[in-house]
Amino acid sequence: MDIVFRDVEHRYQINTPFEKRALYDIHVDIRSGSYVAVIGHTGSGKSTLLQHFNGLLQPTKGTAHLGDYTIVAGKKEKQLKPLRKKVGIVFQFPEHQLFEETVEKDICFGPMNFGMSEQEAKARVGEWLALVGLPEEVRHKSPFALSGGQMRRVAIAGVLAMEPEVLVLDEPTAGLDPRGRKEMMDMFANLQRQKKMTIVLVTHSMEEAARYADDIIIMHRGTIVRRGTPEQIFRNVDDLIHLGLDVPETVLFQRAIEQKFGIQFPEPCLTIEDVERSLQTLFTRVKRI
Amino acid sequence: MNGMIIGKYVPGDSLIHRLDPRTKLLLMFIYVFIVFLANNGWTYGILTLFTCLLLFLSRIPFSFMMRGLKPVLWVIVFTFFLHVLLTKEGHIVFQWLGIEVYDKAIQQGAFISLRFLLLIVVTTLLTLTTTPIEVTDGMESLLSPLKKWNVPVHELALMMSISLRFIPTLMEETEKIMKAQTARGVDFSSGPLQERMKAMTALLVPLFISAFKRAEELAVAMEVRGYRGSQNRTKWRELTWGRIDTAFMLFIGLLAIALWLLRS
């Protein structure tokens, strides 16, 4: 499912003294099956943008094409439920949305709302638990008896169970330990590869954006200011700093080396592995001399 | 909900905004009593004039106030017609389909609705020009004599300010959870009753859990900072009683006397 936004604008509390423009001039194309990271400062409009992806918010100007749906500003779209099945959103701290007595029931809640039978949903709980790396034992436990990290996984399983075509993630790893982060991010990358899911990741972590995304969108004060592959985006370090964003540690390290030895690496090092490779070629070159 | 302005604070720097909250509370309190003194054209005229003066001094736009009154307007209209139809005093003004309307009834209806309107305008004016913190501070200060009889005035005021403080937070939380559950296919606004009940649990359970958690965290945070109720606490924002406050109190006193003399 492709997502195409044309000249989208969103104002909160329109026509009141409290009116606030949160988004403007948004032109964006997200191809089906791609992995896009949205980065930007707090208050840059990231969360507002992603709520447009399943019609929770509707543009106050412009058009949003979401697969077969076309949402035009000013026209009330009535039946959004099929759209919401196709676009799953994992909000920040999704564990706050848990409410059922058992993990099983909570995971089945989403798919059953979208018309799956209770039998089928229950039969597949095991599959979804495995997907997020939770053991089968938690199935009949109360979600509130689990640890914070496990609760997060249950909540994510509840969204994945809807089998969306597009998965929108709003800082899914906030507050997790480094290992939990890596596991979770690897899981999303797998979903994209194996199930051909489109993934939109909102994150503050430049390392995550650099490592996992095919495409990066930078938002600043309510609009998109940069768009490109991680290599393009992270080549221009000063530009990022100017926008008040962090630069991945690996890119900073690379820059320090480049300055120290007066050399230039062919491309930006986005992961630890990239750094390793670049250093090895550097060493072999040095040895040869 | 958006139309409601009762309980909303509109920032400003008018004379009324700058009054000591105690003055405003007392003013309102006295006003609520003296409204009942009025019983003829003169007294109601004076009261209306006084109320308009307050509204003018507060610099709250008249249209803004009117918009806020819309939700209660039909109650006022209803009161008026109730009086018109049920009071049977004076001369008959007109008869229609067996309904008799008396002149006293119209007068009475008009007065009662006006009284109602004035009361709402003045109480709304208080919350429009006073922050919730100021209101609780003022309350605490006014009720402090009750401490002699072991009334936990400070604790009551604290409870009040904490609950006022967390209303917006809870509203935000509600919206967030509603969005998250809507994204999971819940429909809060339509559908059969049973499904909507189910939808409400999906909203209320997480809301209660987070509210309890928040309350506990707040209690712990206060505990670790050695919060000990009202013992020897000083205030960051001291209430100061100025000349203008005295003037306003005198003014309302004069108004009360005038009403007493002019009422029939």
Image (cartoon, coloured by chain):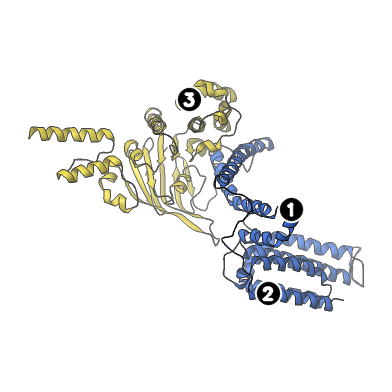
Chain colours: A yellow, B blue
Under tag 3, what secondary structure?
A: loop
Q: What crowding class fits label 2: few (fewer than 14 Cα within 10 Å), some (14-19), or many (20 or more)?
A: few
Q: What's the CA distance linking mark 1 and mark 2?
A: 30 Å
Q: Which residue in the protein does label 1 denote?
A: B150
Question: As rendered, which of B248 and B49 lies closer to the eye?
Answer: B248
Q: In this view, does B228 lie to the left or right of A37?
A: right
The kind of residue on which mark 2 rests is Thr
Give residue A34's position: percent from left, percent from top: 36, 37
The kind of residue on which mark 1 rests is Asn
Q: Would you say residue A155 is visible in this rendering?
A: yes
Mark 1 vs 2, N-terminal side: 1
The kind of residue on which mark 3 rests is Leu
Instruction: Check residue B246 in the rendering and tell me which mark sits there, or answer none.
Output: 2
Instruction: Check residue A134 in the rendering and tell me which mark sits there, or answer none.
Output: 3
Q: In this view, does A246 lie to the left or right of A157?
A: left
Question: As rendered, which of A164 and B149 lies closer to the eye?
Answer: B149
Under tag 2, what secondary structure?
A: helix
Rendering quarter of residue B240: bottom right
Q: Give the mark toward the camera: 3 or 2.
A: 2
Asked if disc 1 and disc 2 are in contact, CB closer than 8 Å, the reply is no
The residue under the point 32% across, 39% down is A210
Are the numbered discs 3 and 2 placed on the same chain, yes or no? Answer: no
The residue under the point 49% across, 42% down is A54
